[in-house]
Image (cartoon, rainbow, N blue to C red):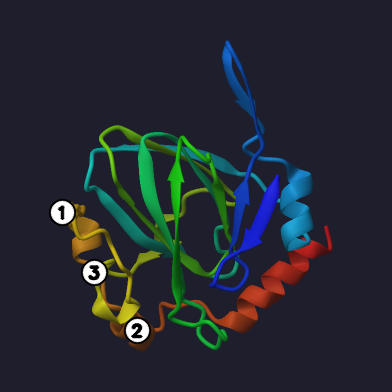
Amino acid sequence: MQTEPMAVHDAVVLTPRQFTDPRGLFLEWFTETSLRSATGHALELAQANCSVSSRGVLRGVHFASVPPGQAKYVTCVTGSVLDVVIDLRVGSPTFGVSDSVLLDTVDRRALYIPEGLGHAFIALEDNSTVMYLCSTGYNPSAEHGIHPLDPALGIAWPADVEPLLSEKDAAAPTLDEARAAGLLPHYDDCQRRYAELRQH
């Protein structure tokens, strides 16, 4: 599996090898060895999620309080999505930076999003199905959001796709509002979390 760092520090794109024959294809969409090689630690698996979205559905920007935070390993098994990672870690050298990758059924890439980073995606096709492994379970009191259309994030969403947001995401604060409210994770806390994971 090929691994490549993103512009947002600590986020990684993983591209699997695909083996095809007249019956179809086979691939390993997650291997611990590939992730450990790229990050220095394994993924603690607590929950696996699946979301199915119509074209234009925009989910996020979501993140969790650190500690413990929630790391995610994301891929798209049907359709295609533009997946975006945003550095929300106050004090990070890439704070406020966003980067994106196309997740689809052609390259079948996966994306590792460590604790402290924001995550969002927009479906580019109907029935786009995103699967993601999570390091911690859902905890409503620790879950937060940033409005995905906040100009301060500088995300280049596709101009030809009309975004459809949930009521919760549409009511999310801007980046500046979330920072002023003390909702954003801190870079040092995240680095301590990553160091703890590398000790396992």
The residue that disc 3 covers is 149
Task: Judge the density around disc 1: few (<14), some (14-19), many (≥20) Cα neighbours within 10 Å.
Answer: some
Query: Image point 53% across, 70% down: which residue?
Result: 116
- Indicate the position of residue 95 as horizontal and vertical percent values: 49, 82
Quadrant of the image for the C terminus? bottom right
Quadrant of the image for the N terminus? top right
Q: Is residue 129 above or below residue 140?
A: above
Q: Which mark is residue 162?
A: 1
Residues at circles 2 and 1 in contact by the CB criterion of under 8 Å? no
Q: Quadrant of residue 55?
A: top left
The residue that disc 2 covers is 181
Q: Give the amino acid at mark 3.
A: Leu
Residues at circles 3 and 1 in contact by the CB criterion of under 8 Å? no
Let me know if residue 42 appears in the view.
Answer: no
Which mark sits nearer the N-terminus, 2 or 3?
A: 3
Residue 21 vs residue 71, the one in the foreground = 21
Q: Secondary structure at mark 3?
A: loop
The answer for how far apart the CA atoms under marks 2 and 1 are is: 30 Å
Q: Quadrant of residue 113?
A: bottom right
Q: Is residue 59 above or below residue 61?
A: above
Residue 118 vs residue 56, the one in the foreground = 56
Which mark sits nearer the N-terminus, 2 or 1?
A: 1
Task: Judge the density around disc 2: few (<14), some (14-19), many (≥20) Cα neighbours within 10 Å.
Answer: few
